[in-house]
Image (spheres, coloured by chain):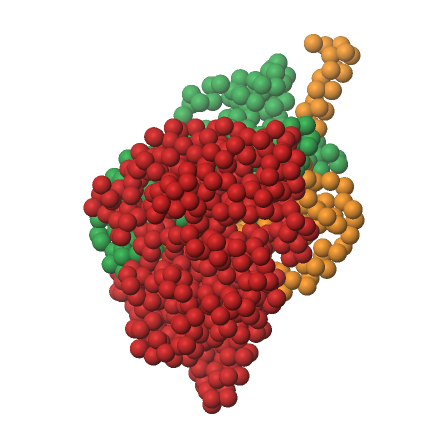
């Protein structure tokens, strides 16, 4: 088909398709934008009868605000552990030949898929209680880090592989120690990689339910992912005002972090943010 | 849009290379001992909190261990009985089939093709429309699972769901009448962002001159895709398929939306294992099922890596090929 | 990462076998500060699930207990460990804690978990934990033997029951009026229930009848559906410590489900939804559901005028209640005309508590007459204590009815460890019928499933 009519039709078809795709992605999220500000939120997304009352109610809920703080502690703690340990390991693995390295990494990656599952729940719990790590943030952070490290090392090793060795050689000529070389030469170059791993860790930990659910006991330590379930079951029915408002606040930090990091480092995730 | 250099792509290092590249020489003068010290803390955490529970789980899989009741205090060793039971268990076979549908429908077809289409459309576009679309797709991917699950439960709700209000189909129970279809559509919505990003990066690597030459040679858009674009991004396609297949295979979000129901019609493997291990407390059997799941992961990974390895070899042969070798494109495969 | 003790990897690797690892890491660092520390755990949380119970424990029971102990010269500190989880998750968490010997000193269980927990040796009889003195508690005399049985497994007492309840048919009086049905409805057989449902079906937009079915409803299916019907057909799930498989009574029950759900008298989708039970509550409150089989909880907590989750301002006028009829008069278990089903929670002690004496005292403090009255705070409920019941039940005619008429004909679930699994097999059988399987086939499938669950047929009644 050619000519102006054909072009017009093609244009209409293209924009209709585009509108459908936009709707497909946007519609399920409408509720998150409307319900928190609605005086009487229902399941349907609708123009809200505007109020900030729901936020005040949430603020007064003893568990809600605490849980966001706990989530921050767990996410930041895990990110620090994972980024530090994986950077060290990835650098060494990238620069020094260790036989069987790739096979080992693959094996660990695969194992990480069982341990994050429910079947490993009993071993994880008994291990933590044996080590006195039940009801402590460090227990959750270590267990989560153990599961995330293989993938983190994997991603970071790719980044460090791309650092030209000439940088390090010239640094060594000036007498820098290996740790110094790592800090002053390699880290700045692989910063996008470190950011990727950090953001990825935070996103993983932020959404994780099972491990904190198993290992934490005090309600004031429970993170948002766990506390959200207590709103599901309030008196047997979901409290829509509380759930929608909490969902919004709970989502905001990860969205902001994503925006910040992608602005700042101008990179795209490409290594697997949600293994 | 940095991170487009193909060397930073995840499949790098994915297959052991025959010849070590120069960067693997010990440029920093680390020495074996220091290298070990660098690796040790990470490995210790991994050994203690990942390997140990994993091995323990494998051991549990050979017992009749339960969370409560007599087997909780005195588990018996049953060997491979759990595994043989699983192969005759209708629930397990059903969940395997549903998982296959889920992976093929939502990841291999939905996310991979949808992600490519989006990346292709965005390739040369800028402006607000692109920014809006891209942000929406990314947002669906960033939100925490429990939030997303609730959004979809609300969206598809039988009585007040937004979808029913829009389509004027009051009372249509999507999650009950079409549970797997709903989950597949959900997962396309949820995960397309990753494929889109990966392909965006990959498409940035396709030399414009090649496309130009192909166009001058009279190739239509589909031909360009087939002859120029696809061969250039084949590695990315495989990496993407590997990752999204494995993620989708292990995804637990379906549980948050349908809990496997109604009557097990959306009980994918992770949900089935959860129901077995927690719902009925059969931890030994659940652990054995996890082991089977691990084996399937392994098989999938090996198949993809094989394909990837083959692609690598081809690439090494035709490193920096002259532009004309790609013009007609099809013969690219031949020179391997 | 300061928390990793040195005795790590090797010690744990050595202890790889499951049974060996519970060798005690008390989680309680507070003890070192001197004095006695106790923890009490209930599936309740302030501002969430069972909020009022959580507040009652932390603001009423604990301060008074601590004061009473101090008056006797005992320095004790009590923490309340709240949770707001699905029952299944709460159970998992307790089981793991008990396994690691790191559980709270006093905790609430659903009565039907008692057997499994006892068999796993997670809990022990009170006599073993506190010694013979436990029988001295004067409260025992106030607890009916049948209610005490909720806390009994293989003849031994494991804790103190926390009240009981009764299952009834609730019906929406305005809908009955519109359908030309009597407002004082007293069905005498299953056929009369179905007749009423058929009349209700003529009202547009009304679901006539909900009898819980399927697995998403969980125990509600067994308790509010299968068991009252089974008892009404003269059947039972178990006899002594053996179970019934595919019996004529079970087939009759499943056939009743078929008539309701395949005959358009109930909404099968409502039974399949994860939140279907809540939706059925909302539908009843809105006048879109005619008859609902539920526990007295429905009256107290769901449609209660101000405090309910689906409040009905004119509950007392609009909600009718009646006993489950037998299939036909005289056909229920024991030749009765009506049936009901009862259950309840139990508070138990951690067998590894460091302070069994104080833990037991805390346990009894949760069950004193004054404590129960404070918890009820002007409302009514069938508590475990006869003295409290005598004082509170007259506040609410419905609960008086439940306590007198329903409890007179009620049945408790068998105190067997396999109960929860058998129960889920029953739920599956109803789910199959609702989605179209013939009752006969579903009953036969239940018989087979039972063998799998019990590991053979030795514990099945022939």
Vertical placement of C262 versus C135: above or below?
Answer: above
**Total number of numbered labels?**
0
Looking at the picture, tell me which residue is in the foreground, A24 or A155.
Answer: A24
Q: Is residue B151 left or right of residue C146?
A: right
Percent x, y of residue C39: 46, 73
- Residue at 49% x, 18% y: name it: B330
Q: Is residue A59 left or right of residue C224?
A: right
**Residue C168 horizontal/vertical position (percent):** 50, 48
> What is chain A's hue in the picture?
orange
Specify the colour of chain C: red
Residue at 35%, 76% (x, y): give it: C134
**Residue B234, relative to residue C240: is it above or below?**
above
Can residue B90 be seen in the rendering of this structure?
yes
Q: Residue at x 50, y 40 (%)?
A: C187
Q: Is residue B309 visible?
A: no
Foreground residue, C314 or B274? C314
Q: Quadrant of residue C437?
A: top left
Q: Residue furthest bottom?
A: C73
Q: Quadrant of residue A142?
A: bottom left
Quarter containing the C terminus of chain C? top left
Q: Position of residue A64 (x, y in %)?
A: 62, 60
Residue A259 vertical position relative to residue A127 in the rendered view, above or below: above
Q: Nearer the viewer, residue C4 or C288?
A: C288
x and y percentages locating residue A167 in the rendered image: 53, 54
Q: Is residue B227 left or right of residue A98?
A: right
Chain identifier of the green chain: B
Give left or right: position of A249 versus C222. right
User: Which sits in the foreground, A132 or B257?
Assistant: B257
Splitting the image into 4 quarters, where does residue C416 fall? bottom left
């Amino acid at each position: 088909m050619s000519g102006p009519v054909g072009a017009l039709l093609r244009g209409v078809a293209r924009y209709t398709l585009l509108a459908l795709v936009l709707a497909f992605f946007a519609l399920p999220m409408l509720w998150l934008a409307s319900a928190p500000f609605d005086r009487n939120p229902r399941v349907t997304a609708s123009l809200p009868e505007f109020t900030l009352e729901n936020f005040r109610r949430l603020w007064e809920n003893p568990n809600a605000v605490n849980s966001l703080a706990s989530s921050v502690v767990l996410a930041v703690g895990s990110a620090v552990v994972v980024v530090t340990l994986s950077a060290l390991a990835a650098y060494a693995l990238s620069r020094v030949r260790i036989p069987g390295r790739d096979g080992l990494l693959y094996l660990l990656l695969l194992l990480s898929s069982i341990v994050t599952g429910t079947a490993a729940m009993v071993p994880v719990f008994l291990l933590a209680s044996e080590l006195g790590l039940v009801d402590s943030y460090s227990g959750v952070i270590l267990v989560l880090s153990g599961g995330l490290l293989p993938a983190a090392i994997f991603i970071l090793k790719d980044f460090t592989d791309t650092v030209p060795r000439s940088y390090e050689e010239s640094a060594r000529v000036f007498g820098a120690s290996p740790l110094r070389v790592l800090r002053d030469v390699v880290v700045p170059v692989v910063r996008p990689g470190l950011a990727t791993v950090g953001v990825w860790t935070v996103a993983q930990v932020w959404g994780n339910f099972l491990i904190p659910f198993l290992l934490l006991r005090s309600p004031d330590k429970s993170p948002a992912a766990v506390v959200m379930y207590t709103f599901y079951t309030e008196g047997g029915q979901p409290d829509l005002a509380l759930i929608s408002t909490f969902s919004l606040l709970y989502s905001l930090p990860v969205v902001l972090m994503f925006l910040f990091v992608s602005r700042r480092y101008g990179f795209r995730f490409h290594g697997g943010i949600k293994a | 849009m940095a991170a487009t250099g193909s060397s930073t792509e995840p499949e790098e290092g994915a297959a052991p290379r025959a010849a070590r590249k120069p960067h693997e020489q010990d440029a920093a003068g680390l020495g074996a001992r220091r290298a070990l010290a660098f690796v040790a803390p990470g490995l210790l955490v991994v050994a203690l909190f990942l390997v140990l529970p994993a091995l323990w789980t494998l051991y549990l899989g050979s017992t009749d261990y339960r969370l409560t009741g007599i087997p909780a205090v005195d588990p018996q060793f049953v060997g491979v009985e759990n595994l043989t039971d699983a192969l005759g268990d209708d629930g397990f076979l059903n969940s395997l089939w549903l998982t296959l549908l889920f992976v093929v429908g939502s990841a291999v077809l939905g996310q991979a093709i949808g992600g490519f289409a989006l990346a292709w459309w965005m390739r040369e576009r800028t402006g607000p429309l692109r920014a809006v679309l891209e942000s929406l797709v990314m947002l669906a991917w960033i939100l925490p699972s429990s939030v997303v699950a609730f959004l979809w439960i609300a969206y598809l709700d039988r009585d007040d769901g937004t979808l029913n209000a829009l389509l004027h189909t009051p009372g249509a129970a999507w999650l009950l009448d079409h549970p797997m279809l709903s989950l597949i559509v959900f997962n396309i919505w949820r995960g397309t962002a990753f494929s889109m990003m990966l392909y965006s990066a990959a498409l940035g690597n396709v030399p414009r001159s090649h496309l130009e030459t192909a166009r001058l040679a009279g190739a239509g858009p589909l031909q360009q895709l087939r002859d120029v674009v696809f061969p250039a991004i084949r590695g990315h396609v495989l990496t993407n398929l590997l990752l999204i297949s494995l993620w989708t295979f292990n995804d637990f979000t379906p549980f948050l939306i349908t809990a496997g129901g109604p009557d097990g019609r959306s009980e994918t493997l992770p949900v089935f294992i959860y129901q077995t291990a927690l719902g009925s407390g059969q931890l030994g059997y659940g652990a054995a099922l996890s082991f089977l799941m691990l084996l399937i992961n392994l098989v999938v990974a090996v198949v993809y890596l094989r394909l990837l390895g083959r692609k690598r070899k081809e690439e090494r042969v035709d490193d920096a090929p002259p532009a004309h070798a790609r013009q007609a494109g099809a013969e690219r495969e031949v020179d391997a | 990462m300061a928390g990793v003790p040195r005795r790590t990897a090797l010690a744990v690797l050595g202890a790889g076998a499951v049974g060996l690892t519970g060798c005690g890491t008390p989680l309680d660092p507070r003890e070192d500060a001197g004095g006695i520390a106790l923890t009490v755990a209930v599936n309740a949380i302030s501002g969430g699930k069972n909020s009022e119970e959580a507040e009652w424990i932390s603001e009423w029971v604990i301060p008074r207990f601590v004061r009473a102990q101090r008056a006797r010269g005992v320095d004790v500190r009590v923490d309340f460990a709240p949770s707001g989880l699905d029952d299944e998750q709460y159970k998992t968490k307790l089981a793991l804690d008990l396994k690691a010997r790191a559980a709270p000193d006093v905790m609430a269980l659903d009565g039907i978990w008692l057997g499994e927990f006892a068999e796993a040796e997670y809990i022990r009889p009170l006599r073993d934990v506190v010694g013979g003195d436990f029988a001295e508690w004067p409260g025992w005399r106030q607890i009916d033997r049948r209610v005490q049985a909720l806390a009994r497994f293989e003849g031994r007492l494991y804790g103190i029951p926390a009240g009981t309840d009764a299952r009834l048919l609730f019906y929406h009086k305005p809908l009955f009026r519109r359908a030309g049905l009597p407002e004082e409805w007293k069905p005498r057989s299953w056929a009369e229930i179905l007749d009423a449902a058929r009349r209700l079906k003529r009202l547009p937009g009304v679901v006539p009848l909900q009898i819980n079915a399927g697995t998403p409803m969980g125990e509600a299916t067994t308790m509010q559906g299968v068991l009252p019907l089974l008892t009404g057909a003269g059947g039972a799930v178990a006899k002594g410590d053996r179970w019934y498989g595919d019996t004529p009574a079970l087939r009759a029950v499943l056939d009743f489900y078929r008539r309701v759900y395949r005959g358009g008298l109930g909404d099968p989708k409502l039974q399949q939804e994860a939140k279907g039970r809540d939706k059925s509550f909302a539908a009843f409150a809105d006048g879109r559901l005619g008859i609902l089989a539920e526990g007295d909880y429905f009256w107290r907590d769901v449609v209660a005028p101000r405090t309910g989750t689906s409040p009905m301002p004119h509950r007392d006028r609009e909600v009718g209640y009646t006993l489950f009829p037998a299939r036909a008069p005289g056909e229920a278990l024991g030749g009765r005309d009506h049936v009901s089903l009862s259950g309840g929670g139990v508070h138990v002690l951690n067998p590894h508590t460091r302070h069994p004496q104080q833990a037991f005292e805390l346990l009894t403090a949760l069950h004193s007459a004054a404590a129960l009255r404070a918890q009820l705070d002007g409302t009514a409920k069938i508590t475990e204590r006869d003295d409290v019941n005598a004082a509170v039940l007259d506040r609410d005619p419905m609960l008086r009815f439940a306590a007198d008429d329903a409890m007179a004909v009620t049945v408790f679930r068998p105190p067997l460890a396999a109960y929860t699994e058998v129960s889920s097999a029953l739920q599956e059988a109803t789910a199959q019928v609702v989605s179209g399987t013939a009752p006969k086939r579903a009953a036969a499938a239940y018989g087979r499933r039972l063998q799998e669950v019990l590991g053979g047929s030795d514990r099945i009644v022939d």
